[in-house]
Amino acid sequence: GESVGLHLPTLSVQEGDNSIINCAYSNSASDYFIWYKQESGKGPQFIIDIRSNMDKRQGQRVTVLLNKTVKHLSLQIAATQPGDSAVYFCAENGGGGNKLTFGTGTQLKVEL
Amino acid sequence: DAGVIQSPRHEVTEMGQEVTLRCKPISGHNSLFWYRQTMMRGLELLIYFNNNVPIDDSGMPEDRFSAKMPNASFSTLKIQPSEPRDSAVYFCASSPFGVGNEQFFGPGTRLTVL
């Protein structure tokens, strides 16, 4: 039979607009979360992380928001640039150790 | 800083052959992770080591897969015998040991089994 790959959600934005990528995590015991960016042909690259004692953390052009009540994580990218086009993964640590569980990813496409 | 080093970057082999993937973690990092990425299943953790000791190998798909970490600066992932369904990109990542430390990924090895 024909194989079917993962259907990655896709977010298309215009250059210069803000992007918001969402992630629902599964383990209420998770206390550490990371966003990774993966460009085509490369390994995932760290963007920003947040611990469960915070609900917001800002980096350069990126902000991560954590809502533990509904187990939701979001990544906001300000003034999106063509170089931001990639697949973005959220990851959680499951509440212990340094093992991470990754989400399926969101494809971000930046249109000129 | 060289980052995580993986070799080879690309490997094409025939079904039934043995495949060995290699990883050199970042110096000073004492946790090492092997992942597999496919279109079908996304990014999956296969096994990870802390201080050269395998901690969790529950993601290793079957006995054909084995991983070793003989010292702090080297790890191998071996597939014997290889099958076409093993075709994927295999990533190695390392991190300092401890809760909540980011993992640094290597460039990956793209494996094709014919």
Image (cartoon, coloured by chain):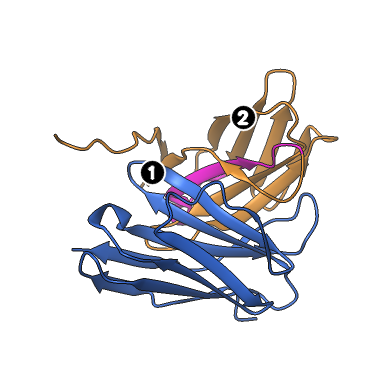
Question: Which residue is at 58% across, 41% downward?
Answer: A90
Q: Nearer the viewer, residue A20 or A30?
A: A30
Q: Position of residue A103 (x, y in %)?
A: 52, 38
On the same chain, marks 2 and 1? The answer is yes
Q: CA distance from mark 2 to mark 1?
A: 23 Å
Residue extending furthest toward the front: B63
Q: Position of residue A35 (x, y in %)?
A: 61, 46
From the viewer's perspective, is residue B62 above or below residue B19? above
Q: Quadrant of residue A32?
A: top right
Per the rendering, the mark at residue A109 is: 1
Identify the residue position indicated by label 2 in the image: A25
Colour of the chain lettered B = blue
Neighbor class of circle 2 (other Cα within 10 Å; few <14, some 14-19, many 20+) is: many
Q: Is residue B62 visible?
A: yes
Which residue type carries mark 1? Answer: Lys
Q: Quadrant of residue B93?
A: bottom right
Span highlighted in magenta in the image: A79-95
Question: Which residue is at 42% across, 37% downward?
Answer: A13
Q: Nearer the viewer, mark 2 or mark 1?
A: 2
Residue extending furthest toward the right: A53
Judging from the image, what secondary structure is the residue with disc 2 in? loop
